[in-house]
Amino acid sequence: MPGKGYAIRPFKPSDAGAFKQLNSRWIEEFFGLEDEDRRVLEAPEEAILKPGGYIAIADEAGQAIGTGALILPKAKAGQTRWGELVKMATDPASQGKGVGGAVLDHLIEIARKSGVEKIWLETNDRLASATALYQRKGFQALGPDEEHPTPYSRCNLQMVLELGVD
């Protein structure tokens, strides 16, 4: 998906450092890294790709300026196929260019092609720009009685996007 001077492409092993740096920056700025962050950021191929997930990179002239990932857990027959959106990040110098929206649109399309019916995410309402982006794309906040256990102490908002079935 082309953007204004950038393109969205699949993760390559050489992107591991940028994936970690882009995400570590915002997490440390607002909250502090947690064990689950370290597990995913230290080994994104093991944590996301090998189990069947997907990592998108926003690339501008060979530089990773944004990223996001989709975890595709296995669903049993008759169960809703869920995907989980994780590790969305945009370089501060590239914010306001639509990078996050382009990455998110790409991941939603990957989810649809993978047969995902609902995409779930965890965030924090302090991240107003991210929350607004998710809402613009159709994500709805879960009520307290709908929330799931989370490995993140910073998570105070869980959202879902219903894709339906084609």
Image (cartoon, grey):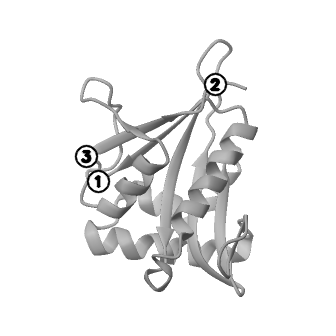
Q: Residues within 10 Å of mark 3 (few under 14, many from 20)?
A: some
The numbered disc on residue 124 is: 1
Amino acid tagged 2: Ala
Q: Residue at x 35, y 54 (%)?
A: 131
Categorize mark 1 by other alpha carbons within 10 Å: few (<14), some (14-19), many (20+).
Answer: some
Where 100 sits versus 91, above or below?
Answer: above
Question: Picture coordinates of residue 105 (x, y %)?
Answer: 61, 54
Reading the chain from its start, which is encountered first: label 3 or label 2?
2
Would residue 126 be found to the left or right of residue 78 on screen? left
Find residue 117 and report its horizontal and vertical position in percent.
61, 29
Q: Is residue 160 visible?
A: yes
Residue annotated with mark 2: 75
Write the residue at 65% across / 78% down: 4
The secondary structure type at the circle numbered 3 is loop
- Circles 3 and 1, Cβ within 8 Å, touching? The answer is yes
Pick whichever, 83 or 74, lies toward us: 83
Cα separation, mark 3 vs mark 2, equals 26 Å
Q: Relative to 71, does residue 164 appear above or below in the rendering?
A: above
Answer with left or right where residue 157 lies relative to residue 138. left
